Image (cartoon, rainbow, N blue to C red):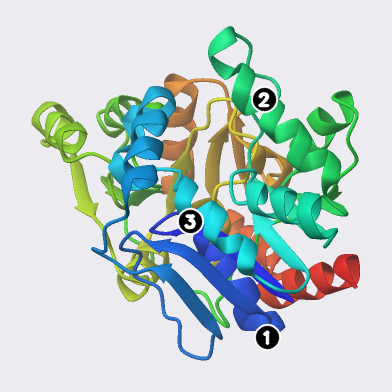
């Protein structure tokens, strides 16, 4: 059994693939190392293109195509068509993470009849316009030919059902702390892979309204986006850039609240789950899939806008511990061990 992921960089998709491989014992195949700082000890893995290695002509062509759809995510987000084709040499049943890696499974099945599974994190089937005609049709074919489709939220499952496809829901996992700290700073945290699509200026506006220190942790897809943000909001926000797992766990252990917005982002957001695992109440908006995990007023809040988010955060800062304990209890059921167990049940 294989687990295939296109990129090893600091975001939720490769983190999930790495932890799945760790807890199932299945082989991890990474198409390209884009600079992700993950602990791969104990993981059986292979990387088709190492960090800093350059591809050929087809790689440059795919980089140009990617910029047409997702220029805001930077060059590292390139969909490597040459590696998608190369990965067809993989043998054995494979779980492909995202529809682009799934192209490998689709092409391989058409040629050899070998079955595959797909973990769909976000779907383009709901995006209208001629520009997305090709990605939509490609995704339909990859989903249709998959033996099993898995996704990360009930919201995504319902969207797929509306489009005529069945899917199983397996939420991402986390490492819940064995014990959570009762000593909390007036620290508000947000964790993400930052780009303009995540609308970082909204977090800057929240930072000006909350009565505590505000930290935005995580890598930035484009350095010019980060510089512009720091120029505008650097007086109220601490921007960490890429952080190690140890640094991130330290932030979760000290924080009193985490805020994360999504914009029709039906996945839960890995930082939300991780924060809950360390007893941090969460504030999310209606456009993020993790709203499914929030019990209003018990382990966090689902809000509509910046003003409501700021008000709820200030409310939590006055007494974060009761909601934090509830958040921790929610996270215990979402461990990576439970994630891997459910995955094995579905794919067996």
The disc at residue 83 is 3
Distance of mark 1 from mark 3, alpha carbons? 24 Å
Distance of mark 2 from mark 1, alpha carbons? 33 Å
Residue 83 located left or right of residue 120: left
The answer to whether residue 319 shows anywhere in this view is no
Mark 3, secondary structure of its residue: helix
Of residues 136 and 331, the one drawn nearer to the viewer in this rendering: 136
How far across and down, in percent of the image, does residue 75 sit?
29, 41
Residue 161, compared with residue 329, is above or below; it is above
Q: Which of marks 2 and 3 precedes in the sequence?
A: 3
Residue 273 located left or right of residue 140: left
How far across and down, in percent of the image, does residue 288 sit?
60, 34
Residue 335 sits in quarter: bottom right
In this view, the mark in front (1 or 3): 3
Residue displayed at 32% across by 44% down = 57
Residue 49, compared with residue 310, is above or below; it is below
Crowd rating for badge 1 (residues with CA inside 10 Å; few <14, some 14–19, many 20+): some
Residue displayed at 62% across by 46% down = 268
Crowd rating for badge 3 (residues with CA inside 10 Å; few <14, some 14–19, many 20+): many
Residue 177 sits in quarter: bottom right
User: Where is the C terminus found, in terms of image quarters?
Assistant: bottom right
The disc at residue 25 is 1
Residue displayed at 76% across by 32% down = 140
Q: Which of marks 1 and 2 precedes in the sequence?
A: 1
Of residues 122 and 170, the one drawn nearer to the viewer in this rendering: 122
How far across and down, in percent of the image, does residue 271 sit?
49, 54
User: Where is the N terminus found, in terms of image quarters?
Assistant: bottom right
Of residues 41 and 296, the one drawn nearer to the viewer in this rendering: 41
Mark 2, secondary structure of its residue: helix
How far across and down, in percent of the image, does residue 174 sit?
59, 68
Mark 1, secondary structure of its residue: loop
The residue indicated by pointer 2 is 136
């Amino acid at each position: 059994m294989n687990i295939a992921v296109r990129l090893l960089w600091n975001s939720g998709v490769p983190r999930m693939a790495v932890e799945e491989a760790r807890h199932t014992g299945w082989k991890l195949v990474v198409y390209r190392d884009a600079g992700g700082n993950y602990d791969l000890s104990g993981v059986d893995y292979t990387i088709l293109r190492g960090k800093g290695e350059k591809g050929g002509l087809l790689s440059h062509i795919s980089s140009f195509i990617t910029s047409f759809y997702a220029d805001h995510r930077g060059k590292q987000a390139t969909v490597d068509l040459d590696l998608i084709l190369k990965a067809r040499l993989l043998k054995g049943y494979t779980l492909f993470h995202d529809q682009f890696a799934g192209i490998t499974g689709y092409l391989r099945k058409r040629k050899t009849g070998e079955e595959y599974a797909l973990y769909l994190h976000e779907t383009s089937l709901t995006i209208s316009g001629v520009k997305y005609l090709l990605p939509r049709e490609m995704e339909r074919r990859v989903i249709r030919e998959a033996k099993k489709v898995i996704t990360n939220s009930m919201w995504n499952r319902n969207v797929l059902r509306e489009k005529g496809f069945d899917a199983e829901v397996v939420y991402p996992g986390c490492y819940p702390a064995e014990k959570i700290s009762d000593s909390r700073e007036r620290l508000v945290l947000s964790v993400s892979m930052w780009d303009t699509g995540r609308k970082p200026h909204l977090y800057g506006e929240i930072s000006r309204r909350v009565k505590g220190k505000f930290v935005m942790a995580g890598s930035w897809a484009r350095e010019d986006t980060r510089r512009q943000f720091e120029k505008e909001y650097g007086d109220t926000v601490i921007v960490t850039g890429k952080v190690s797992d140890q640094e991130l766990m330290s932030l979760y252990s000290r924080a009193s609240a985490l805020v994360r917005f999504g914009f029709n982002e039906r996945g839960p957001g890995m930082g939300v789950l991780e924060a809950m695992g360390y007893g941090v109440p969460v504030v999310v908006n209606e456009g993020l899939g993790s709203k499914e995990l929030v019990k209003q007023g018990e382990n966090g809040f689902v809000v509509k806008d910046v003003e409501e988010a700021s008000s709820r955060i200030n409310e939590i800062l006055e007494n974060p511990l009761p909601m934090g304990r509830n958040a921790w209890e929610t996270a215990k059921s979402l461990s990576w061990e439970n994630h891997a167990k459910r995955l094995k049940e579905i794919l067996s």
